Image: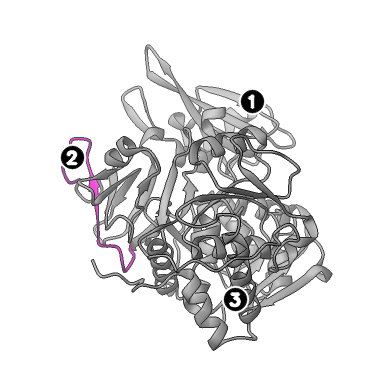
Amino acid sequence: MYDVSTGRTLHSLLAHWAGARPTADAVVFLRDPGRPDTLGTVSWERLATDVEDLRGRLAARGVRDGRPVLLVLPNAPLTLALWLAVPANGAIVQAMDPDAGLLALRRAAHATDPVLAITTADTSVPGGVEVLRVADDELWTTTAPRELSARSCVPPAPHPGQVAGLLPTSGTSGPPKLVQLTHRNYVTSAERLARNGGYLGSDRHYLCSPFFHTNAQLYICAPPFVTGGSIAVVPRFSATRWFDAARWTGATVASMVAPPLRMALHRAMESGRPVQPGALRAVHYGMTLSAADWVEWDRLVPGVHMRQIYGQTESVTGVLGSTPWEVDDREVIGRPFLGVEAVRVVREDGTEAADGEPGELWVRGEPGNTLMLGYRDAPEATAATLVDGRWLRTGDVMVRHSDGRFAFRGRGMHIIRRGGENLSTYTLEIDLQACPLVRDVAVTSRADDVLDAVVIAHVLPADGYDEASFRAWCRENLGRRGVPDEIRTHTSFPRTGSGRVKVQDL
């Protein structure tokens, strides 16, 4: 397969834009997503200069030669600068959730043996891992933290085929694995998303997803390095201030999964005020909202183009999606992206599924280029996922329509066989979320001797909820098959960093 990265790295692209657009904004940030007076900027030239300084200082701490570095920081300009500097030294970035706690930090240190952990927390890491502590005020500049004082010569530039980052899988239905991504993977993902998304040098990409998540690094931060655009940074996702922060930073494009998008929509509905999205022109989203939510979205923000896309960390960003000029029907995802070698829909017996027949999506590519290099220290899991070393088994059930477009039906492990019928928890969740008696719904199942499995609806009640009324709404709107066998109420859901519900914890 042709290599669209052509020897480039994010670091070499940074140097290019520092020369081509030195005074243009590379980063625009809000220290407080609720206060427009906390706005700041970093130019391409400033970012490149500070990254070079960081490289030398990090090299003195042993950040080189393929050693991992734990980056345990919130979204901030310094986080971006370190994300660029560490792999530019030939080391590996492993971003982590800064709110995950000490046990998660210890597990990560045990798993990858990092040379350094960079964090704002006053903590120690087992195994003799050196800790670089960053003060809160230092996050909002790209200059080196005060503790990083020593300097050394800068190591040679890494080879594009070397591992640059470790990203965890989502962990929604089981323990996450660490996906190895090369420098080539990062540039390939940036090219694929920029070309298929119609991104321009004038676009500003809205970073509110947590930095340890695929959406933050690959879908949002990588594309501006091939287009010369910019990144709008807020420290965390705020459902209440999502539209405000986008407007204040001048964000033009966003990438979100449906759960936090739904939270932002409902906060806007509850406020009763008109939504002002500012320059925001497009939102690319994964998963979808309920029909009732889409009615409200179109009422509040009719001028923002919505586009559903599909991809995984293992597939190196987007695989399927519509074009920027197509109208999103909120159900069908679209066709394979340019730059994707091939896709298949496969039955359980390994044969090709017919149009209209559900099956597992397989994606063909080249590991370390258009697909992940593999899972770290997990050769058996890698071999099971990369069939014949070239076909990625996504684990997701899709249907291919006769016009070449694909529709998502759910994770293979989330298909419930109840009473001889196959039910998709994904589809049922979307339908149940349309009920005005609930704030959110997640669906699981348990084994049953008679039905094989029974459906359990986990609900966050809204005002006026009671179980009898909820069941009556289900029968009337979804029919007999749409009524859950069991209903359990919760005050909140355990979620991943991107907002997805951790169903294994329900």
Measure how far apart labels 1 and 3 are at the Cα level: 58 Å
Amino acid type at mark 3: Ala
Residue bearing the label numbered 1 = 467
Residue 260 placement, left or right of 29: left
Residue 85 screen position, x and y as percent: 56, 64
Q: In this view, does 484 lie above or below 437?
A: above
Image-quadrant location for residue 471: top right
**Where residue 224 sits in the image (x, y, percent)?**
52, 73
Residue identifier under label 2: 350
Q: Is residue 262 in the magenta section?
A: no
Nearest-to-viewer mark from 1 and 3: 3
**Secondary structure of the residue carrying numbered label 2:** loop
Circle 2 packing at 10 Å, graded few (<14), some (14-19), many (20+), is few
Q: In which quadrant is the C terminus drawn? A: top right
Residue type, numbered disc 2: Gly
- Is residue 345 visible in this depiction of the protein? yes
- In the rendered structure, the answer to whether residue 83 lies left or right of residue 192 reads right
Residue 502 location in percent, x, y?
55, 35
x and y, in percent, of residue 424 in the image: 40, 37
User: Residue drawn 38% across and 66% down?
Assistant: 188
The quarter holding residue 54 reads bottom right
- Highlighted magenta segment, given as a residue range: 336-352
Magenta span main SS: loop
Residue placed under numbered mark 3 in the picture: 48
Check residue 337 for magenta coloring.
yes
Q: Name the mark nearer the viewer: 2 or 3.
A: 3
